[in-house]
Amino acid sequence: MFSHVMVGSNDIARSKKFYDALFVAIGGKPGVEDAKGRLIYAHNGGRLMVSKPIDGKPATHANGGTIGFSMSDAKQADAWHKAGVANGGTTIEDPPGVRQGASGEIYLAYLRDPDGNKLCALSRMPAA
């Protein structure tokens, strides 16, 4: 359904440090910068891009928006969350942990990136 997700940033170098740490923590590679100065991350068939807004105005985060990242397990979600906090992210919501989802238990960890975008690591728990 989706070809990619793009978030805005006011500081591409700061975002690269943050997102590189997140992707490396889950077995991905650091982002590459294209000719337009956008960061591109590709992992497990998905693509995340980070760019300064093309209209020249400051980047802002989406109120109510969340970008979810699939994790293989709770340990990977914790590594992702730890890497984010260590590299300029802010932990938000409840602490990382198990929640009851519509289709069973899920493990969630939430962060805001340095520009305020809301991110979520999600791992579906094995059925009991």
Image (tube, grey):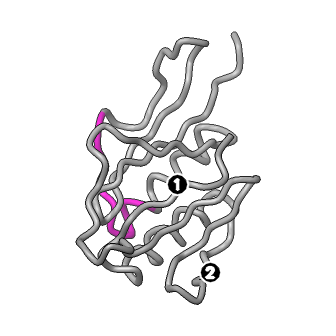
Q: Quadrant of residue 114?
A: bottom left
Q: Quadrant of residue 31?
A: bottom right
Residue range of the region highlighted in magenta in the rendering: 84-93
Q: Dot 2 corresponds to which residue?
A: 32
| Secondary structure of residue under mark 1 | helix
Characterize the local packing of mark 2: few (<14), some (14-19) or many (20 or more) Cα atoms within 10 angstroms: some
Characterize the local packing of mark 1: few (<14), some (14-19) or many (20 or more) Cα atoms within 10 angstroms: many
* Amino acid marked by disc 2: Val
Asked whether the residues under the numbered discs 2 and 1 touch, taking CB atoms below 8 Å apart as contact, a structural biologist would say no
In this view, the residue farthest toward the front is 55
Residue 67 image label: none
Residue at (48, 34) in percent of width and height: 108
Q: Is residue 88 magenta?
A: yes
Q: Dot 1 corresponds to which residue?
A: 80
Q: Position of residue 40 (x, y in %)?
A: 60, 72
Q: Position of residue 107 (x, y in %)?
A: 53, 30
Q: Is residue 101 left or right of residue 116?
A: right
Q: Position of residue 60 (x, y in %)?
A: 26, 60
Residue at (48, 15) in percent of width and height: 100
| Secondary structure of residue under mark 2 | strand
Q: Position of residue 19 (x, y in %)?
A: 49, 67
Examine the rendered structure and indicate whether residue 106 appears above or below residue 116.
above
Examine the rendered structure and indicate whether residue 109 appears above or below residue 5.
above
